[in-house]
Amino acid sequence: MIEVKHIRKSFDDKVVIKDVSAVMDTGKCNLIIGSSGSGKTVLMKCIVGLFSPDAGDVLYDGQDFTHMTTQEKKDMRRQIGMLFQGSALFDSMTVEENIMFPLDMFTNDTRGEKQKRVDEVLDRVHLTDAHKKFPAEISGGMKKRVGIARAIVLNPKYLFCDEPNSGLDPQTSLVIDKLIREITVDFNITTVVNTHDMNSVMEIGDKIIYMYQGEKEWEGSNKEIIFNNNEKLNSFIFASDFLHDAKDMRMLEMRGKISDDRNMDDLLNK
């Protein structure tokens, strides 16, 4: 679990994050959403430690990351995996070498042990035949999966994904969402996803934080978001007439299911 308590962050005279508090649950996909300039990226960077907040605390399972020493932060970062927006693979390295890079940096494992771990994570992201390929030889979706494999190679407790579906087609995006969710559940990871992809919101949004002008405007699940009455959130998510209609249809469907469930309960209790 990650706790964010009263985080504030400014750049010169511009306040970007205004007293934001939130809890990211373990074994869940915790999404941070919002339009450009809402502060969602700065908030994630404060949580990871790329930015130092002006005020507030970030706690990893009760450990105050904000006030740790440099060595303590270094030790904590070994428990953090990061999937970058552009995958951030080294062009001159093969897939195998890219994934092995964190093992070379942070472990004293033998070559055989590292190779075994690389094989394991490549199998987990369904890329068993890509070891010797270079990034230029694989598709965008495969690059994302290599990025995920590298992010989990050190068995992290916390996984951060920055716009994981950026630049991908809708079908490939669903594959990446499913993979992130499976890894989160299977390994009981605290996953934080920064996204503006509404498919991700509806597919894997166990917990959603909506940022608006540096503040936490709304918080809830992907089921609750359908029935929300927040005008700013609805304007952001259901921006088009088509999406408004889709929301209305989904609400009718869910209300119908609730009604059916209640009728079934009534029959069972008779």
Image: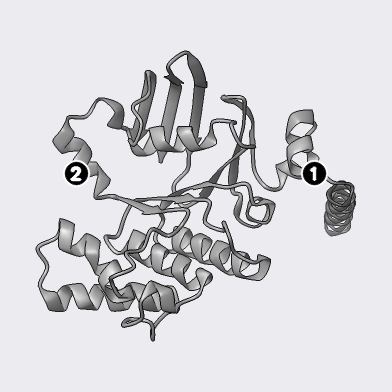
Amino acid type at image mark 1: Phe
104 is higher (above) or lower (below) than 18: below
Residue at the bottom extreme, as displayed? 129
142 is higher (above) or lower (below) than 220: below
Is 245 placed left or right of 190 in the picture?
right
Residue 107 visible in image: yes
Other residues around mark 2 within 10 Å, as few (<14) / some (14–19) / many (≥20): few
Amino acid type at image mark 2: Asp
Is 107 placed left or right of 187 in the picture?
left
Mark 1 vs mark 2: which is more N-terminal? 2
Q: CA distance from mark 1 to mark 2?
A: 42 Å
Residue that label 1 marks? 238
The local secondary structure at tag 2 comes to: helix
Q: Which mark is residue 198?
A: none
- Percent position of residue 145, x then y: 45, 68
Question: Residue at horizontal 35%, vertical 59%?
Answer: 151
Question: Residue at horizontal 29%, vertical 60%?
Answer: 155
Q: Marks 1 and 2: CB-CB under 8 Å?
A: no
Residue at the top extreme, as displayed? 13
Is 175 placed left or right of 64 in the picture?
right
Residue 230 visible in image: no
The quarter of the rendered structure image containing the N terminus is top left
- Percent position of residue 84, x then y: 42, 53
The quarter of the rendered structure image containing the C terminus is bottom right
Residue that label 2 marks? 75
Other residues around mark 1 within 10 Å, as few (<14) / some (14–19) / many (≥20): some
- Percent position of residue 80, x then y: 32, 49
Q: Nearer the viewer, residue 241 or 14?
A: 14
